[in-house]
Image: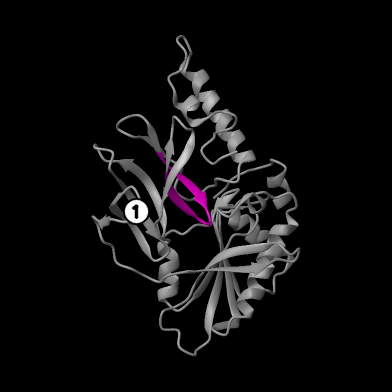
Amino acid sequence: MGYHRLGHLTVSELLSPPPFGTHPGQRSKRLAAARHERLASSSTESGVGFAEQTVDWSPDGQRLLTTELSDGAWHAQIINIAEDKVERKIPVNGSVVAPRWSPDGKRIVFSLENTDRPLAIQVSNLDGAERKEVTRPASYNTAQLIRYQSADGVVIPGFLYSPRLAGQAKRPALVWLHGGFPGVVGNQFIAPIQYLVDNGYVVLIPAYRPSSGFGKELAKLDNPQKTMEDIAAAVSYLHGLQQVDGIHIGIIGESFGGLAMLNFIAQQPDLFAAAVDFSGTKARTLSGVVTGERCWAD
């Protein structure tokens, strides 16, 4: 099944006008059911906390401009409706947000972000060879896409931020646990992390299970202990870095990441020098979330 198929329906079938007499609510349910089936069966997965997938018709009504989440970034691609296939992908360094056609169908406009630059508007031709920056934001610290191995052998990707002028001094470090179930670890700009890095911290955002953006295996969570193992392995990775002061490693979790952090420090309270929870769930275990028992609290 290709990325452009939504469940058993092609894009053209999904976006074609509904049959006469079809209630709008029926079409919404059809779209939602097809989207759910696609997320469960295809190699593209979605999550919480990052840009959403979008689609836009070409002016001649023959093609769709959409986005695909892979390798931690949203990539723009053009779908040929008649042939029901991806016609081309537009290469950029970063994540494409809300791409739209130009009135003549020869160019596209979109917002682009990556780990070191916030959203900026760009205009590009269809092969990405000619691009123009409409807005030009300042650049910050660029994250490195790294990978480490968890206890069961699964490779966990992550984005590692390092201070620009680290020198030879050992630096404190933070493990940043994203929110969402699953949430997205992406090539995106995160201002609070840039603030921490500017103040001398090394920051690692691991794609711990469950995380979207790097395939189906990491997006699912059958055993909550895997989350704990992925976090522990992130700490071991930081200990192996020459620039990191192993005595001063902290952890920050937001939403589901806050819940994971609370569960982790309850099991291994001495592994971190400090722990911070942002809007995490309270009085719940990871097992309760996995089985559907969810209660979000401030």
Instruction: Return the residue at label 1.
Output: 128
Residue placed at 32% from the left, 41% from the top?
100
Magenta stretch contains residue 271 = no
Q: How was the colour assigned to the protein in this rendering?
A: one colour
State whether residue 243 is above or below residue 32. Answer: below
> Could you say where residue 109 lies in the image, as x and y percent from the top left?
30, 47
Toward the bottom, the furthest residue is 168
Residue placed at 35% from the left, 29% from the top?
61
**Image quadrant for the N terminus?**
top right
The range drawn in magenta is 65-77
Quarter where residue 146 is shown? bottom right
Q: Could you classify mark 1 by the number of other residues whose Cα lies within 10 Å: few (under 14), some (14-19), or many (20 or more)?
A: some
Residue 285 visible: no
Nearest the eye: 46 or 245: 46
State whether residue 160 is above or below residue 10. Answer: below
State whether residue 262 is above or below residue 4. Answer: below
- Left or right side of 153 for 272: left
Magenta stretch contains residue 66 = yes
Q: Secondary structure at mark 1?
A: loop
Residue placed at 44% from the left, 50% from the top?
75
Toward the front, the furthest residue is 83
Q: Main secondary structure of the magenta part?
A: strand
> Could you say where residue 82 lies in the image, as x and y percent from the top left?
44, 29
- Left or right side of 18 for 253: right
Residue 33 visible: yes
Quarter where residue 173 is shown? bottom right
> Could you say where residue 26 lies in the image, as x and y percent from the top left?
52, 18
Residue placed at 61% from the left, 34% from the top?
37
State whether residue 19 is above or below residue 3. Answer: above
Q: Label 1 sits on what residue type?
A: Gly
> Could you say where residue 134 lies in the image, as x and y percent from the top left?
23, 55
